Every structure is written in structure tokens, then in C-alpha cells.
Image (cartoon, helix red, strand yellow):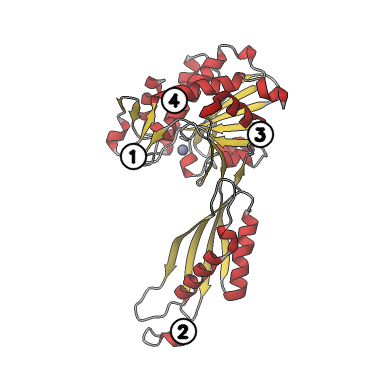
Amino acid sequence: MIDLVQDLIRIPSDTQEGANRALEFSAKWLEDHGVEVTILENEGYKMLVAELGQGDETIIWNGHLDIVPGKKEQFEPYIEGDKIFGRGSADMKGGCAAMMVAFVGISKHADRLTKKVQLHLVTDEETGGSKTSKYLVQQGYTGDFVVCGEPTFLKIGLQAKGISQFFITFHGKGAHGSRPWEGDNAILQSHRFHQLLLEQEWTKESSEFYEHSSINLARIQAGDRFNMVPDTCEVGYDIRFIPGQTVEFVEEQLTAILTEHFPNAEIRRRGISPAVTTKREDPRVMQLVDIMKDETEIMGQHGSADTRHYAVTGAGAIEFGPAGGDWHGPGEYVSIASMERYRDILMEFAYYTGVAEQV
Ligand SMILES: [Zn+2]
């Protein structure tokens, strides 16, 4: 497993071509270890599916092999104590390697499995996941429960905030910069809008795992001369709302502020994604809790992963993976001990028959 994760780190999978190479490498590795795989391709992005076991229930292990760009030296992995350093070690080639080794492990006794276990390796999570994980779901590769092996320190990332991204264009009235009172400054409109937005009760609402929504004024485009009052201003919002709220709800709330205070403004959607709302009572979550006993910690994620693409089918979807640090940063590493523990938990989870029968 340690060699495997280092081999994966050496493949710079921060481009489509590199991610496909990492995918092909993984396919060959699995085949060399006796696992049959199916490779699919969508818009040039490759992905891999393998299945073991039998029964009515399907659990999916999902891992992404693409990474964010790194410095040249980060593609030469090295080990210090329990840590393997390198780009993608934590996010998430460590998780992928552990999943692959666990999958080969359960393939030795696949006749004992009372459920189907699918391995999905994908190549575009860091750029949204719509070309591979979302595509797999659209092609019918769905299951009852999905584990995305993102680095969570072996905590169960039960829920994730939803995403609603909007552009809003404010229209004011231009004037000479020396007589601003004759105009209506569109930048100031957007500023007023932002204040009104932050005052809204729903933005401060909390839930079990979250204190409040995340509201990020991400983009602004307006004004091109010092001596003019800007007559238009376009802003871009990235709002991560808590489970229980919906994209439609957020859009209604924004529209209500605009209708009341800025009737000329226009709003348009950019990207949306529902919140992931897996429940503690999901029988597979309870199985994991039973396997991990006192080790168990359950949390909510502020960002989102490929879980959201599976969760839209109603499947339970969690982020659950090894420990590491500084992913997307220069000192990225994964913990070897936690990868080993992760591999063992996955294998136990695949064979688990305890709580499922009692529930
Ligand atoms: Zn990731």
C-alpha cells in the first residue's frame, strides 16, 4: 500500500491527461491483483468501476485520482516517520490506495459478501465531479450507500452544505464623478444589498453540525473611470447553505430582497448543488459506528465532495478517509497508520452483517 500510494503520487494527475494516466495505472494494478475492472470515458475523462459480491444492497467506495496542481518536488514522494509527503497524498491518493488494497483484500473471499461492493475511481473531483462521478450516477452506477475517501481523519463526514452560486447585476444611473448625487452608484447598491443579506435570519440559522451558512461575496465587476459614477455592478455570490435549506429557498430569499429594494436588478444562477443530508440513523452509518466503537466521531463538512452527486438519488453518502495534513498546500502528507486502519475498517464494513439485520 505504501508503494502504491507513492507510485500514484509520482503521476502528476493535475491535468486531464495526467489523471487519466493515474486511472490507467490503477486499472492495471487492480487487474494484476486479480480484479476485473470496467473503464468508462466521458468527454475525455476516464473512470473505473469494479464490482464484487452479491445481494440486494450495494455500497460504493469512491475515490478521485485527480489532484490540484503542485510544485515539481511534490511529485517525488518521501516518508518521514508515519507520514508520506507529496501532492495528492492526503487528497486523496492515500484514500484511493487504501480502497484499492481493501478491494483486492475482499476479492479473495468475495463469495462471503452478503452485499455488492463497487469501487469507483474518478478523475475530475477537484473540478466539480460532473464528468465522472456525476456521469457514473447518470449511467446507473448508483448504490444504497457511498463512501468518498476524502481525508477526514477517520471521522464520518455525515453532511455537507449545499451550494448556490448566483450572479446579480445592479443597475444605477451614471453621472459625472464630481457630482455623484446626480447619479445612482451601482457599486453602492451592491454594498447595501450585502448588508441586507447578512441581516437575514436564515443566514444565521444553525443546525446540528453547522453554526450558520457560509456567504461569500466572491466576485465583483464594476466601474472603469475615476470621474464617473458607475451605472452597473455585477456581483457573484457563493452561498453554502445548511442542510434543511434548499437552492430554491436561497434563491427566493435573494429575490425577495431585490424585489423590495432593487427592483431593477437581475439575478441568474451559476451553479447549484443540494446539501448532503445523510442521517445518523442510516443503517450503514450505524454499522460503521459499531465497527469503530470509541474511535467514532461524526461531523459536517463546510465544503462538498463527490458525495453530493450520489446523494441526489437518495443514497446515504459520507466523506470518510484517512488522516493527513496541508492538502492543497505545500506540505501535504498522509498518515500511514491511518491508511492502514482505514483499509481494515473498509474491509470489515464490506463483510459486516451485524446491525443491518437487527435494524
Ligand atoms: Zn479530494
Q: Residue at x 59, y 11 (%)?
A: 109
Pointer 2 or 1: first along the chain: 1
Q: Gap in Å between the C-alphas at discs 3 and 2?
A: 57 Å
Q: Amino acid at mark 4?
A: Met
Among the 4 quarters of the image, the one containing residue 254: bottom right
The answer, for residue 179, to whether it is visible in the render is yes
Pointer 3 or 2: first along the chain: 2
Percent coordinates x, y for residue 177 in the rendering: 37, 83
Q: Gap in Å between the C-alphas at discs 3 and 1?
A: 38 Å
Q: Residues within 10 Å of mark 1 (few under 14, many from 20)?
A: some
Q: Nearer the viewer, mark 3 or mark 1?
A: 3
The correct choice, above or below, for 274 with respect to 251 in the image is above
Q: Gap in Å between the C-alphas at discs 2 and 1?
A: 48 Å
Q: Which residue ends up furthest to the left in the rendered image?
A: 73
Q: Is mark 4 within 8 Å of ligand 1?
A: no
Q: Is mark 3 within 8 Å of ligand 1?
A: no
Query: What mark, if any, has residue 70 been given in the picture?
Result: 1
Query: What mark, if any, has residue 339 been given in the picture?
Result: 4
Q: Amino acid at mark 2?
A: Gly
Percent coordinates x, y for residue 314 in the rendering: 67, 39
Pointer 3 or 1: first along the chain: 1
**Cβ–Cβ under 8 Å for marks 1 and 4:** no
Q: Amino acid at mark 3?
A: Asp
Q: Which residue is mark 2?
A: 183
Query: What mark, if any, has residue 282 been given in the picture?
Result: 3
Q: Residue at x 51, y 20 (%)?
A: 344
